[in-house]
Image (spheres, coloured by chain):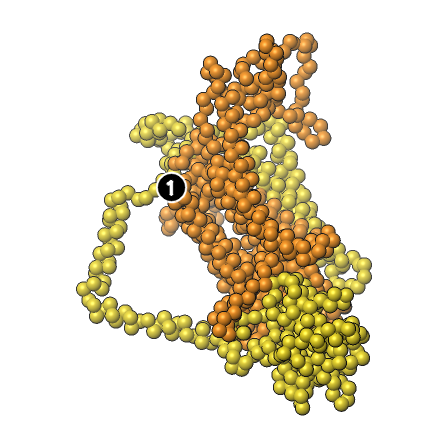
Amino acid sequence: MSDTNTQVRDAAGVDLDNPNLTRFDIVREGARRDGVEIVHYEAQYPPGSKGERRMTRIVAFFFLLTGIMSTLFVIAFIWWPWEYELGPHASKYYTPVLGLTLGLALVGVGLGILTWGKKLLPHEIAIQERHDGPSAPEEQKLTGNTLQFVGEEMGLGRRPVLKWSLLGLAPLGLAAAAVPIGALIKDPHHPDILFKTGFAGATPTNPIRLMHDDGTLVRPEHVSTGGQITVFPNIPGGASNHHADSPTLLIHLREDDAAKLNGQLYTINQGSTWSSFVAYSKICTHAGCPASLYEQQTNRLLCPCHQSQFLITDNARPIFGPATRSLPMLPISVDKEGYLVATGDYKVPVGPAFWEKD
Amino acid sequence: MKRRKVDLKALPGKTAQEVDTRLPVATPLRGMLNKVFPDHWSFLLGEIALFSFIILLLTGTFLALFFEPSLQEVHYDGSYIPLQGVQMSRAYETALDLSFDVRGGLIMRQMHHWAALLFMAAIVVHMFRIFMTGAFRKPRELNWIIGLSMFWLGFTEGFAGYSLPDDALSGTGLRIASAIMLSIPVIGSWVTTSLFGGEFPGEIILSRLYILHVFLLPLILLALVSIHLGLVFIQKHTQWPGPGRTNNNVVGERFVPRYTIKQAGFFMLVFAVIALMGGLFQINPIWLFGPYEAAVVSAGSQPDWYVMFLDGSTRLMPAWDIRFLGYNIPPLFWPTVVLPGILTVLPMAYPWIEARWKKDKASHNLLQRPRDVPDRTGLAAMALAFYLVLTISGGNDIVADKFHISLNAMTWAGRIGLLILPPLAYYFARRLALGLQQHDREVLAHGVETGIIKRLPDGRFVEVHQPLAAPDEHGHTDLPYVGWTVPKKMNRLGALGPAVRGFFRPIEQPAPPQQEEQPREEITSGKS
């Protein structure tokens, strides 16, 4: 950089009305006044050269490509069959055709602009000085004093009453917070939604029947030995997302497995199985996904979200993965008409754990 | 009647003067046109995020014209025959309509989703570049913090968008999110029921996510993007060291025309890539997943890629439950609440941590090559290894399935790998950086390897080196190490001439063949 040179020219000043100045001279002078020195400015191809004409043709080609592709895009958008049809049909290609034409149109305009800017515009190197670092000490002092003066004029130091009265404004902030918080807040314990499911209210004398997701009731013969099905409480909306904590896995254990399970039932699960049938909550105790991948050979339930594994012959105890709690067991029985029923709600809250859940 | 003649040629100048009398812009405008920007390919990574964000705003506005975030139950009777008559939420129905009954709706949906993935990818890669080159150092700590905040905002924004269509995957994701909120000690259950308006899923959550997704978060992102770019503008972009480049100047091209034109072209190319992907590559085919039902899930459920590292951390977490006095902290809390907290606070504080560690409180406008700061490069490799183990573990069931590996073995490999690989990555990256640095110094001292082996009179063989400057009597050159590219090959020095250019045939005519083969001059300079 030619610092001294700049100084000299600055002192002399460039006469902008000088008719001998080219426009680039004026541009360079403007940049100089902005603290920018254009140290190198050179056309990449001499004007009128073969290379320049070639680059011009390339830019024109790209823009032409854009014109053609955009036109094709509009034509396809309007006339290509787009409404859904089953099976192989031209409408399946609607979105790919739109993407291809729009994409190529944009490729054309992008590459055209880039070629124009990078090849046809002169190559330049410009240098600009940075002016960072702190402000001048004098400036800092002036501004600092101005701010301090404002503080003094407000006079909080001199007027203690005002200082204390500011505390009186605090409730305004409370009021601002109260509206959104107060409107949004919902007590998880009244009603006790986290501890109850769609089976709430079931008792041995007044049980709730189990049903399939289509609403038909469940009989023991619906589940083959070693098989499992998903059942829901037979209440209005019992299979819908309104009772997202109620889906239950009904498993028909093989005889030996049933004996094994009944031999090591937790106290809380005593009396909850019926014959060789057992029902576990389908909602994983880890993060709430349906733990629904049932491996018949090993008697394991796998949750596909985080791979917690539960052993159904041992109270659905977690044996691998991040889950720490067994799947809750639903107490079941069969009523006089031969339908499977729940004789009570889950005895521990179903689904993921939380602070108040022991 | 006499018509006033309008001089078209003088019109722009006249208009400009009219504007300037009302709003004097000539000086600040020229300052802006002349502002100098340094140029390097790695400075364009952030732009990809910016351009994707613009495309997200455009496509998102289109989608909002047709989408209804309602959990009201309806029976589908749209064009997609396999789902006709199925009970579903209005949100899922309108998302299906966008895919089948709105002309061009599917490509907009897919472009929106791809742009979101690209947005997050560009942010991550850009952040990695900033970290590896030390661009976060004083005076740019604030912009580093803003960038990190935008990563988490984009993360939340993406998750909200993923949850809106109410398909099987989004509902499952939302359920996990509710479980994560539940796991927060003391207030978890209150926070969850308050946000969901009761028990999961409730009736209101989609409306709340919708206002977050289309208004609050984009607004905050837009504000932060503006501040981010404003700070780059005011503080001026960093630059690599090199000839003529100092800590106190910027060497590059002026904002207008070259820089702006290149940006405009690059925007169009990013747009093109997103349009091509949106049209040609299917993403999130919600009609195949079906509506969300609490009892239904499929194997291989994966979140969008930028969520996978947290999915992985959740999968790897051992089953550690903390229980006392009838209360408990579930294991879900550590990998999904505590870990992201650490991953936010630690990087935000890193500029100050490094300043203390390296006892460097100066302002820096020159970037550092990764090899020139081995400790930081090691840390970056360590972070990357940590992140990759988590991300791969986020899909460990797919890996186990495709490669016939035991799923449990994959989980254990992830747990052990998470502890062992990062320190190894630190060690190797650090050694690699030091080795590269050493080689640069060697070339500066001895010159470039020529590949020519010379036999000395005493029978030894040595390779001839081409010094980069006039050597002293020992054949050494005393060139300063400035932290910038050192030529390593002879053709970098112009000794071999450039390769012949042209794809199908040479663009340039080869030089006419010489009549006589001239005896080659033996390279004698340099001793070792």
- Against A100, residue B92 (above or below) is below
B467 or B499, which is in the foreground? B467
In what element is the residue under mark 1? loop
Relative image position of residue A137 (x, y in whole percent) = 26, 44
Q: Residue at x 78, y 80 (%)?
A: A220
Using residue A84 as the reference point, say whether residue A118 is left or right of it: left
Looking at this view, name the residue that lies furthest to the front. Answer: A263
The chain carrying label 1 is B
Q: Amino acid at mark 1?
A: Lys
**Which chain is in orange here?**
B
- Against A351, residue B55 (above or below) is above
Relative image position of residue B340 (x, y in whole percent) = 51, 58
Relative image position of residue B526 (x, y in whole percent) = 53, 16
Placement of the C terminus of chain B among the 4 image quadrants: top right
Q: Residue at x 30, y 44 (%)?
A: A135
B276 or A158, which is in the foreground? A158
Q: Residue tagged by mark 1?
A: B359
